[in-house]
């Protein structure tokens, strides 16, 4: 079970039975599983809270639920701030050209990125090959890459329950990072943004 879901069930169980809490959360999650702290806060404030008001005579949200929603909102705000800092840094980037079709270049880049603080996995993928380094179970990132290219993302990141995933589409491939949740996302995005293809440099 997801950490956020466990926190939500624990908070709700202070006011309704554990089974009732599970039923409330299950119905709320039936449409879509939240993928960010902001979405979890929205689920609690806009979906679960009105439902809870219909069951119990609350006039305002109880302290435990308020605190949980506030924690998620603050986390979401900090992520936006960090991403904004990364955008500012982009103006000062010293670009590095990387040929993703060169096996030795892929290997060197993967080893260097793996040394970044908090990084637990790296994928450097070209059209005809890729280099993967993971400290634990490999995470398949290949499915996300075509979607990112179609959407036009230069850099993309997602906060999972315990980890951060960051991706940089490049030429006919991509660079992907998996990092611990407490890693500095601004630094990870900076490391990805400065990578470019030889064609972009020469063109």
Image (cartoon, helix red, strand yellow):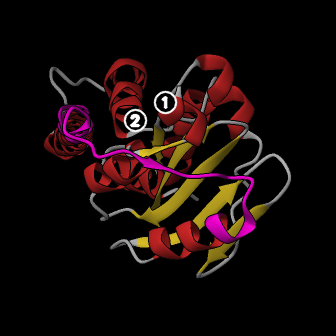
Residue 63 in view here: yes
Left or right of residue 96, residue 111 in this image: right
Residue indicated by mark 1: 154
Residue 13: x and y, percent?
A: 39, 51
**Identity of the residue furthest to the front in this view:** 202
Left or right of residue 138, residue 16 in this image: left
Element class at badge 2:
helix
Nearest to N terminus: mark 1 or mark 2: 2
Please tell me which residue lies in front, 29 or 168.
Answer: 168
Q: Residues within 10 Å of mark 2 (few under 14, many from 20)?
A: many
Whether tag 1 and tag 2 are in contact, CB under 8 A, the answer is: no
Residue indicated by mark 2: 40
Please tell me which residue lies in front, 173 or 198.
Answer: 198
The span picked out in magenta is: 82-105
Q: Residues within 10 Å of mark 1 (few under 14, many from 20)?
A: few
Q: Does 74 sit above or below residue 180?
A: above
Residue 88: x and y, percent?
A: 17, 32
Please tell me which residue lies in front, 31 or 86.
Answer: 86
Q: Residue at x 15, y 24 (%)?
A: 60
Q: Does 176 sit above or below residue 132?
A: above
Residue 162 in view here: no
Distance between mark 1 and mark 2 Cα atoms? 26 Å
Element class at badge 1:
loop
Q: Residue at x 39, y 47 (%)?
A: 8
Q: Does 135 sit above or below residue 52?
A: below
**Identity of the residue furthest to the right in this view:** 128
């Amino acid at each position: 079970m997801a950490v956020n879901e466990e926190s939500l069930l624990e908070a709700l169980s202070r006011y309704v039975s554990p089974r009732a809490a599970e039923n409330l959360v299950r119905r709320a999650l039936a449409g879509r599983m939240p993928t960010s702290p902001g979405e979890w806060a929205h689920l609690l404030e806009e979906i679960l809270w009105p439902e809870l008001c219909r069951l119990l005579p609350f006039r305002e949200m109880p302290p435990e639920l308020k605190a949980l929603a506030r924690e998620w909102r603050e986390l979401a705000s900090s992520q936006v701030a960090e991403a904004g800092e990364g955008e500012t840094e982009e103006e000062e980037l010293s670009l590095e050209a990387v040929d993703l079709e060169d096996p030795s270049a892929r290997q060197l880049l993967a080893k260097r990125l793996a040394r970044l603080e908090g990084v637990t996995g790296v994928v450097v993928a070209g059209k005809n090959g890729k280099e993967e380094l993971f400290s634990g179970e490999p995470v398949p990132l290949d499915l996300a890459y075509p979607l990112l290219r179609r959407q036009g993302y230069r850099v993309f990141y997602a906060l999972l329950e315990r980890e951060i995933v960051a991706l940089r589409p490049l030429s006919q491939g991509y660079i992907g990072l998996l990092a611990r949740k407490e890693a500095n996302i601004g630094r990870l995005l900076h490391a990805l943004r400065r990578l470019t293809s030889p064609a972009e440099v020469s063109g």
